[in-house]
Amino acid sequence: MNNDRRKVLKGTGGMAVMGLAMSAGLLKPGSAWAQDWNKAAFATKNLADTVKAMGGAGASESKDIAIVSPDIAENGAVVPFTINSRIPKTESIALLVEQNPNALAASFDIPAGTDAGVTTRVKMGRTSNITALVKADGKFYYTTKEVKVTIGGCGG
Amino acid sequence: MADPMKIRATMSGDKVEVKVLMSHDMETGQRKDSKGAVIPAHFIQHVTATHNGKVVLSAQWGPAVSKNPFMSFKFSGGKPGEKVSITWTDNKGDKRTDEATIS
């Protein structure tokens, strides 16, 4: 029993070191993406922390963000979402699943000339509030919707 | 090397609609195998879409994005015959770039 536990600990330790090495590698100048993977934001548990990790002070609720998704997802492993923002100067769109182990699922940077709307599919562990977080003109806005899940997507 | 992406770029009005289907396990790092050992996380972290050398969308993903991720978006300024290129990088450093022609 104890032996197994040691192995697991060792394994995860190794992974962490690898992860560090990789994020250091990704920081190389001249790479296609300007910023490194926001590890802090992807480790947060709720909306307020995520906003903080993304560099904002707080977010206000907005009616100009639309979340298109099923109200009841039969399979939590694949839940489709479309987020559209009508807020002018939308810079980025993020999708948060509050009940997942880590809230932030994905974050999209929208350059000028690209529509402020993205579609993707995410995993949901169980019924949860879904929050679409939009950064526009330096400020953060959000809107929330509950999606019910009948079969979870994390347990396999 | 992972399997190629399926990319479709079509004109919709004066905008280009891009749909991408990637082939990736997107392992969360939360699951355990039959022996109870944790399956290490393996997921796409960065996705970048470019058109004529200009970035039209960049994304950061966590492990919560579904297996074989799908993504779609629209941008303006593209013409039929031009190319859209998508690149992803995962947390193990694997990388893949694929191109599609706008139709």
Image (cartoon, rainbow, N blue to C red):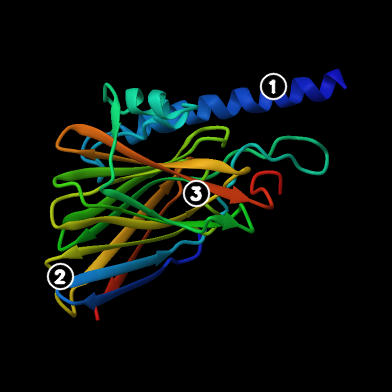
Q: Are marks 3 and 2 on the same chain?
A: yes
Query: Toward the viewer: A94 or A3?
Result: A94
Which residue is depicted at the point 32% across and 34% down? Answer: A36
Which residue is depicted at the point 59% across and 41% down? Answer: B28
Local secondary structure at mark 1: helix
In contact (CB < 8 Å): disc 1 and disc 2: no
* Residue with the mark numbered 2: B78
Which residue is depicted at the point 75% across and 25% down? Answer: A7
Disc number placed over residue A150 in the picture, else none: none
Taking the image as drawn, is residue B92 in sight? no
Quadrant for residue A155, please give it.
top right
* Residue with the mark numbered 3: B65
Q: Please tell me whether residue A93 is drawn above or below residue A2 in the rendered image.
A: below
Chain letter of disc 3 in the image: B
- Cα–Cα gap, marks 1 and 2: 50 Å
Chain letter of disc 1 in the image: A
Q: Name the front one of labels 3 and 1.
A: 3
Which residue is depicted at the point 50% across and 49% down? Answer: B65
Local secondary structure at mark 3: loop
The mark that comes first in sequence, 3 or 2, is 3
